[in-house]
Image (cartoon, grey):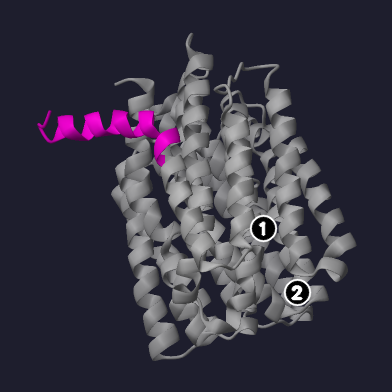
Amino acid sequence: MSKKKQLMKNTIIIFLGRACTQLISFFLLPLYTSYLITKEYGIVDLITTYVTLLVPIITLELEMSVFRYLIDVRDKEKETKKVLSNNFLVLLTSLLLFALAYIVVTCFWHFDFRWLILFDIIICTFSGNFLQISRGLGKTIDYAISCIITGVSTILLNILLIVVFKLGVFGMITSMALANGLGALYLFIKLKLYNKINFKLKDTKLIKSMYKYSIPLVPNSVSWWVVNVSDRTIISIVLGAAANGIYAISNKFPTIISSLLGIFNLSWSESAALHINSKDRDEFFSDVLNTVTKIFTSLGVGMIACMPFVFPILINYKYNEAFNYIPILVLATVFNVAICMYTGIYIAKKMTKQVASTTIMGAIINIVINLVFVKILGLYAAALSTAISYFVMMIYRHIDLKKYVKITYEKGLIIKTILIFTFSIILYYQHNLILNIINLLIVVIYSFLINRKFIKDWKKVIFKKLGLK
C-alpha cells in the first residue's frame, strides 16, 4: 500500500472512532446550554481544562514515548513487552506519588469537586496511555472502537446524570470520567495488556531513554495549554465565570475543526515517523501539507459562512454573544493546522526540544496580549491572543523546519487562502441575510474548485470499491 493510501486508511479508521468523542460535545451543546447556566458551564470548562494540564505533567508525556518506541518494535514481541512493562511501572509510580501529594494538599486547601477531579485525572491518565499504546501497536481498529465506546457512554451518561438526575456540574464531570474509563477498560482487555506486563523486565536505561524523548514534550504540552487556556483563566479572574462560559461556547465550533485535525494528526504522526527517512520524503510531506491546507481552509471558511444559519438553532439565546468571537477562533484553528503538521515532522525526527521551544514562545505571546488587552477589548482580547500566537508559531516553525525538510507549497495557495478568509469574515460581521447567503455560495464554489483533485481522486477510489466505473 502506498504511503498516501496508508495514511488515508488510518485516518478514516481513526475518524470513525474518534469522531464519537471529539465531536460529541458539539452535538450535546443544546443539552448543555439548556440544563447548565453560563456560570456552571464555565466551571465545567475550567475543571476539564486543568485536568488536561495536569495529566501530561504527572506522566511527563510518557504516553507519547510509548507510542513512538512501540512503532520501532511492534513486530518484536520481547521488545514490545519490555517497553510496555517499563511504561506501566513508571505510570503507576507517577500516579501513586501524585495521588499522595494531592491528598496532602487538599487537606489544607478545600475546593469543590476535589475528589471527583482526582478520580477524573486518574481515569484520563490511563485512558490516554492505553490509546497511545493501541496506536503504537498498530491496532487502529481497536483504538477506534474504544473511542466509540467512550462516545456512546458519554451521551448516555450525560442524559442520565444531567437531564434525569439533574446533577449539573457533578453529573457532567462524572459522566466524562466514567466514559473514558469504559473506553480504557476495553483496550486493557482487548489488547491483553495484562499478559504484556512483567515488572521483572525493568530496564533503567530504557526508562531514561523514553524520558529523554518525552520530557521536552512536557513544556510543550504546558505551553499549548497556556496558548489554549490562559485566556480562559484570565477571563474567569477578570471578567468572571459567566464570561468564560460564553467564551467556551465560542470555542466549541472551532473545536470541531480542531477535532478533525487531531484525528488526522494521529495518523499523520505515525506516517511521518514511518517514512521520515524515505527517499521521496520531501515530495510526500509537501503533497500531504498542500492537500491538508486546502481541506482545512475550506472547512474553516465553510464554518464561518454557515454560522449565521446554524448558531441560532443550536445555541440558547443566553449565549448569543459567543457568535462574535467564532471567526477569529476559526482563523486561529486554521493556523494550527500547519503547526500540527510541522510538529508531526519534528516528532518523527525526535526533535522534541524544538517543539517545546516554539510552543513556549507562543504561550508567552498569548499571555502578554491577554493581560494587556483583556480589560480593554474583553473577550475579543482572548480570541485575538490565540490567533496571533498561533500565527507566530506557524511562521517560526515553517522557517525553522526548512533546515531539515524541504516543504513546498503550491503557487498561489497562500494568497488564495488569505483572500477567501478576508472575504468571509467581512461578510460575517455584516449581519445581513442576503450577504450571508452570498458568502455561503461563494465558499461552497471555492471549496469545490480548490479541492477538485482531492475529490476526483477519492471519487475514483470509492467507485472502484463499489465496482463502478
| Residue drawn at 86 percent across, 62 percent down | 373
Residue nearest the viewer, comparing 18 with 387: 387
Residue type at mark 2: give it.
Ser
Q: What residue range appears in magenta?
A: 448-469
Residue drawn at x 40%, y 52% is 18
- Above or below 5: residue 153: below
Question: Nearer the N terminus, badge 1 or badge 2?
Answer: 1
Quadrant location of the C terminus in the rendered image? top left
- Does residue 427 lie above or below 353 as drawn? below
- Work out whether residue 90 or residue 373 is closer to the camera in this orientation and state it: 373
In the rendered image, residue 296, in percent from the top left (x then y), is placed at: 50, 42
Residue 160 appears at what percent x and percent y?
A: 37, 83
Within 10 Å of disc 2 (Cα), the crowding (few <14, some 14-19, many 20+) is: some
Where is mark 1, residue-wise?
53
Q: From the viewer's perspective, is the residue at label 1 or at label 2 nearer?
A: 2
Is residue 453 in the magenta section?
yes
Amino acid type at circle 1 is Leu
Q: Which residue is at the front of the view, 279 or 381?
A: 381
Tell whether label 2 touches label 1 (CB within 8 Å). Answer: no
Q: Is residue 223 left or right of residue 140?
A: right
| 430 relative position to 266: left or right | right
In the image, residue 407 lies at what x, y percent?
A: 59, 20
Q: Quadrant of residue 181?
A: bottom left
Q: CA distance from mark 1 to mark 2?
A: 17 Å
Overall secondary structure of the magenta section: helix
Residue under pointer 2: 236
